[in-house]
Image: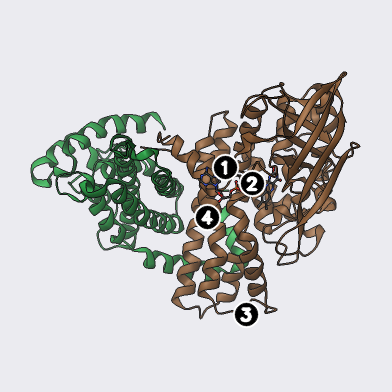
Chain colours: A brown, B green
Amino acid sequence: MQTFEPEAIDWPDTAGALRDRVRGVLADHGPLDPVLRANSWTKPDPEFSRRLGEADLLGMTWPREYGGHEASQLERYVVIEELLAAGAPVGAHWIADRQSGPLILRYGDEAMKRRWVPAIARGEAFACIGLSEPSSGSDLASVRTSARREGEGWVLNGQKVWTTGAHVAHFMIALVRTEPGSERQRGLSQFLVPMDTPGISVKPIIDLTGAHEFNEVFFENVGLSPDALLGTEGDGWAQATAELSLERSGPERYLSSMVLLLELIRVAGDDAGPSVRELAGRLAAEAWTLRLMSASVAAKLARGEDASLEATIVKDLGNSYEQAIPELVHRTVAMDLDGPDVLSMVTAYLLQVSPSFSLRGGTREIIRGIIARGLGLR
Amino acid sequence: MSDTRRMLAEMADPLFAELGFEADDARDWARVEDLGLPLLLLSEEDGGFGGNWQDALTVFRLAGYHALGPSLPEAIVAKVASQGSDAHFQLMAFARTAQIAGALDAALRLSVDYANERQQFGRPLGKFQAVQQSLATFACEAAAANCAAVGAAQALDRGDAAFEIAAAKLRANQAVGVGTRVAHQVHGAIGFTQEYSLHHLTRRLWQWRSDFGHDAYWSGVLGKSVIERGADNFWPDLVARTD
Ligand SMILES: Cc1cc2nc3c(=O)[nH]c(=O)nc-3n(C[C@H](O)[C@H](O)[C@H](O)COP(=O)(O)OP(=O)(O)OC[C@H]3O[C@@H](n4cnc5c(N)ncnc54)[C@H](O)[C@@H]3O)c2cc1C
């Protein structure tokens, strides 16, 4: 039984030139803080995002008409893996470039496309994802935030939570209930909600490391224009789940702890004992395998094939890998987690944030449930 | 899959399925030879099939899937590398990787089918979430072993594949641990009998894990090479192998 038909990947001829372009932007940006290089796709730096926009490295696969560069999916893949491996602060634009832009291009009307897509590609418009609510976590179909029709437009009420980057974002793509009294997956729709609309308040949630990355977002009688509806009324569930396959298989699902593997190699040196050597070898082999798997999903998506099962497999393996790295390094190398050396600092940081790797984007248990369905067990 | 590869698979699959784990070199070798399979990698001028490593992968993987008795991978590799050479050891490590990938897929198939058939507490085992979650992890491991095997084959067709073979064999070895454990657990006692076919796969998987480089061997080799190259070369080296 083959759940993941692997394929020989046709890497683009332009890969080397693209990597040089990314390295150029990074060199201009100056040295990166070694700890912030870990899990760097949650670290916003709007100035860095604008520089990527200027270098034509955002919205790469989108039509020129909307500010894109009509590159291939694998060319985009090369750029994003290069940014993540370097630990670049790509958090500000990450969500918009990865999923919101493609979603607007697919379902948005002309005015919405013109208003947002070129700005995303310039690195000037950032997005956040409004799915989770206080009583809707894994059970996403239970969302209660609602939009009701009023006059020409809509009025939004309710609350989202754990919204990464809501304090930096210019708009949210929110999944809300548009059919009063509807149950579960039915009666849901997606809206593009500009974050400066009156009635929206954003309250920080500080995570266990002391950082402010996610938020609570409250909607109190937020008036939306008729064209804020994204796609088709009532199709929100199908649209949002299609979006998840863009979200699940990218290189960010296995590279969040790459900087720690690099630090391990750096401190190992010539006199590394067998346990450090074997750990470095094992982590290198897994990085190589996951890179092929993740890129192979990108290649499938580029051909318009359904790769949702494969994407889910990449997420499960990738998250387990990036979560295991700090644990394995901590177990293998003697260190003081309060110590000033880079290896200790990065390990201490990643031990704390790594529990989130198998929560965000769908928990490990939910992901494995989806794989089981793909196997024909549910 | 290319047309030649599909043709190869259509040729080899029914024969391997028929011979399976009961096949033996003395009795059945002629039938394998009749298909020209041992000459897979020789050029057409040399009377071979003119196949590349991705073609070989198809055959090795199917041999693993059917837990094929005769030592076909050994015969194929012997035509292109002499026994005892470094190249031979590497190529056999690649062959075992592909066999592991195939055998894991077969064991996964058996396990999923069994979980859907066998009823306890009034429903199929596969309806229990704990069983689903274990089989999902098994599916991930089988997928990783298969992708690693393809990556190594593609590297062999490009040229030097020392890094890829080491990484792929190591990754496949690790998948053996999870796969065999879950397959036996899901099967309960029936999987522990001589009569039921699971052990033809799992016992070979254990053997293949230690053949041509066990986990510690390959992780030591890889670790030494990435440490020698240094942290700053790790990523550029990795991507340079495909760019
Ligand atoms: C760092 C971070 C960033 C995030 N960013 C965003 C964001 O930008 N936008 C957004 O909308 N959300 C975001 N989330 C929320 C994330 O999607 C949820 O945390 C996730 O869906 C799980 O929901 P929950 O936290 O309510 O946990 P729960 O659903 O309460 O689950 C708790 C535990 O129970 C398990 N569980 C639940 N149901 C089942 C079941 N049926 N079977 C087996 N086990 C089950 C879960 O797997 C988990 O282990 C973020 C989360 C994190 C940690």
- Across and down, in percent, residue B130 comes to 41, 47
Type of residue at label 3?
Asp
Which label sits in the foreground, 3 or 1? 3
- Across and down, in percent, residue B87 comes to 34, 58
Q: CA–CA distance between discs 3 and 1? A: 42 Å
Mark sitting earlier along the chain (2/3): 2
User: Looking at the image, which is closer to me, A155 or A333?
Assistant: A155
Residue A236 visible to an observer of this rendering: yes
Q: CA–CA distance between discs 3 and 4? A: 24 Å
Circle 3 marks a residue in which chain? A
Q: CA–CA distance between discs 2 and 3? A: 36 Å
Q: Residue at x 62, y 55 (%)?
A: A356
Q: Residue at x 32, y 50 (%)?
A: B100
Mark 2 lies on a secondary structure that is: helix
Kindly indicate whether the residue at mark 1 contacts the one at mark 2 (C-beta within 8 angstroms).
Answer: yes
Q: Is residue B198 above or below residue A304?
A: below
User: Looking at the image, which is closer to me, A268 or A153?
Assistant: A153
For mark 2, what is the residue?
A78
**What label sits on residue A11 in the rendered view?**
1
Mark sitting earlier along the chain (2/1): 1
- Across and down, in percent, residue B28 comes to 12, 40
Circle 1 marks a residue in which chain? A
Kindly indicate whether the residue at mark 1 contacts the one at mark 3 (C-beta within 8 angstroms).
Answer: no
For mark 3, what is the residue?
A336
Which label sits in the foreground, 2 or 4? 4
Type of residue at label 2?
Val
Q: Quadrant of the N terminus of chain B?
A: top left
Q: CA–CA distance between discs 2 and 1? A: 9 Å
Mark 1 lies on a secondary structure that is: loop
Mark sitting earlier along the chain (3/4): 4
Q: Is residue A365 above or below residue A257?
A: above
